[in-house]
Image (tube, rainbow, N blue to C red):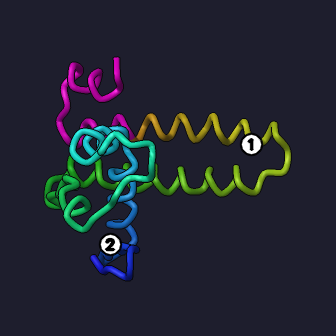
């Protein structure tokens, strides 16, 4: 992690590691974790520190385990798909096309959340808590 003023940069060895971390960091699970651990319940922009960033529990993958590697690869693919849909939504000129991409983004987002829950071994009850049910 590098710090430039108030900008933090997390560096990875390769793009797949970046995509994997991006999927986890933007998941409902980590948003839930962040809210519990670091939210000061103000309406202002949250204070992000090196300490708080270092506390995000990014799971590690055992690449010699075929199941874990498959989950990793699936998450990387989903994040790549999400980024493509985000770009297409941004570039779309017609409102109808934007709505189509927004629906696709929601579907992929739900798939990412489900996979992150699996990676962290959450039970159905824990998932309900995270999702506010």
x and y, in percent, of residue 14 in the image: 35, 75
User: Does the magenta portion include 95?
Assistant: no
Q: How many marks?
A: 2
Which residue is found at the position 19% from the left and 64% from the top?
51
Q: Nearer the viewer, residue 42 or 108?
A: 42
User: Does the magenta portion include 127?
Assistant: yes
x and y, in percent, of residue 21 in the image: 33, 59
Q: Main secondary structure of the magenta part?
A: helix
Relative to 75, residue 54 above or below: below
Q: Which mark is residue 80?
A: none
Magenta region: which residues?
Answer: 113-133
Query: Label 1: few (<14), some or many (≥20) within 10 Å?
Result: some
Relative to 37, residue 60 above or below: below
Q: Nearer the viewer, residue 44 or 120?
A: 44
Q: Which of label 2 and label 1 is nearer to you?
A: 2
Corner quadrant of residue 49: bottom left
x and y, in percent, of residue 25 in the image: 34, 53
- Label located before the other in sequence (2 or 1): 2
Callout 2 touching callout 1 (CB < 8 Å) = no
Q: Secondary structure at mark 2?
A: loop
Corner quadrant of residue 13: bottom left
Which residue is found at the position 23% from the left and 21% from the top?
124
Q: Nearer the viewer, residue 113 or 6?
A: 6
Q: Secondary structure at mark 1?
A: helix
The residue pinned by badge 2 equals 10
Distance from the alpha carbon under mark 2 to that under mark 1:
31 Å
The residue pinned by badge 1 equals 98
Residue situated furthest right in the rendering: 94
Q: Quadrant of the N terminus?
A: bottom left
């Amino acid at each position: 992690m590098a710090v430039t003023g108030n900008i933090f940069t997390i560096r990875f060895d390769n793009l797949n590691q970046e995509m994997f971390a991006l999927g986890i960091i933007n998941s409902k699970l980590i948003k839930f974790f962040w809210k519990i651990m670091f939210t000061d319940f103000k309406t202002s922009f949250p204070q992000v520190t090196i300490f708080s960033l270092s506390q995000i529990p990014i799971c590690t993958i055992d690449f010699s385990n075929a199941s874990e590697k498959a989950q990793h690869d699936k998450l990387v693919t989903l994040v790549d798909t999400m980024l493509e849909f985000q770009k297409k939504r941004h570039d779309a000129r017609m409102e109808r096309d934007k709505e189509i991409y927004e629906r696709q983004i929601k579907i992929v987002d739900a798939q990412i959340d489900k996979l992150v829950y699996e990676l962290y071994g959450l039970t159905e009850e824990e998932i309900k808590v995270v999702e506010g049910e």
